[in-house]
Amino acid sequence: MHLHDLKSPEGARRPQKRVGRGTGSGHGKTSGRGQKGQHARGQGFRVGFEGGQMPLAQRLPKLGGFKNPFKKSYAVVNLTRLNRFQDGSTVDLEVFYESGLAPKGQEVKVLGAGHLGRKLNVEAHAFSAASQAAIEAKGGSVKVLGEPKKAKKVKAKTAP
């Protein structure tokens, strides 16, 4: 069988409707468009027209919101997860990454959820006040990594 042997089944292909060719054609006078009205005139509807109801393109919000380019995102570690380390050990970024508590390369923040049962020296990019208090209460130490925040300079107003 070849492509030129293929034929469509009987009744699958109908002849094109030839409108506006006189009354004898069966599609004369108004050419199947009925009497008057919007469908009988002009080019029909514009793209997106929904019969007078507010179109979808106008119902949706115009702008997509706001993405803060300065947002800090941290890998969050709760206090209870620090109990797996030995008493008196130092928990720094490498230890967080190797133990699977934080994905490699992401900044780490320690939060105060749970209970800490060991004395640890913890180094991370940020600490909540509760976590810092809990670590220091057990005799451990806290070291904040990264650059210290710079204070904004305020210009003094001069009288005119």
Image (tube, rainbow, N blue to C red):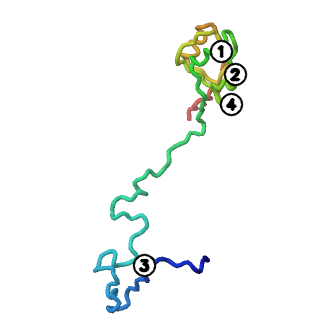
Q: Residue furthest left?
A: 35
Tell which circle, 2 or 1, labels the residue nearer the N-terminal end.
1
Q: Which residue is mark 1?
A: 85
Q: Which residue is mark 3?
A: 11
Q: Residues within 10 Å of mark 1 (few under 14, many from 20)?
A: some
Q: CA distance from mark 3 to mark 1?
A: 79 Å
The residue pinned by badge 4 equals 104
Q: Are marks 2 and 1 in contact (CB under 8 Å)?
A: yes
Q: Which percent across, then down, holds residue 121?
A: 67, 13
Q: Earlier in the sequence, mark 4 or mark 1?
A: 1
Q: Earlier in the sequence, mark 2 or mark 3?
A: 3
Q: Earlier in the sequence, mark 2 or mark 4?
A: 2
As measured in the structure, the alpha-carbon distance from the residue carrying label 2 to the one carrying label 1 is 9 Å
- Seen at 58% across and 32% down, the residue is 158
Disc 2 element? helix
Q: Nearer the viewer, residue 26 or 7?
A: 7
Image quadrant containing the C terminus: top right
Give the residue type at disc 2.
Val
Residue 67 placement: quadrant: top right
Q: Which residue is mark 2?
A: 95
Say whether marks 2 and 4 touch (CB < 8 Å). Answer: no
When asked about the image quadrant of residue 148, the answer is top right
Check the image and report above or below for 4 versus 71. below
Identify the residue at horizontal 55%, vertical 78% (top origin).
6
Choose between 19 and 123: the one closer to the eye. Answer: 19
- Image position, residue 52 (x, y; %): 33, 63
The residue type indicated by label 3 comes to Gly
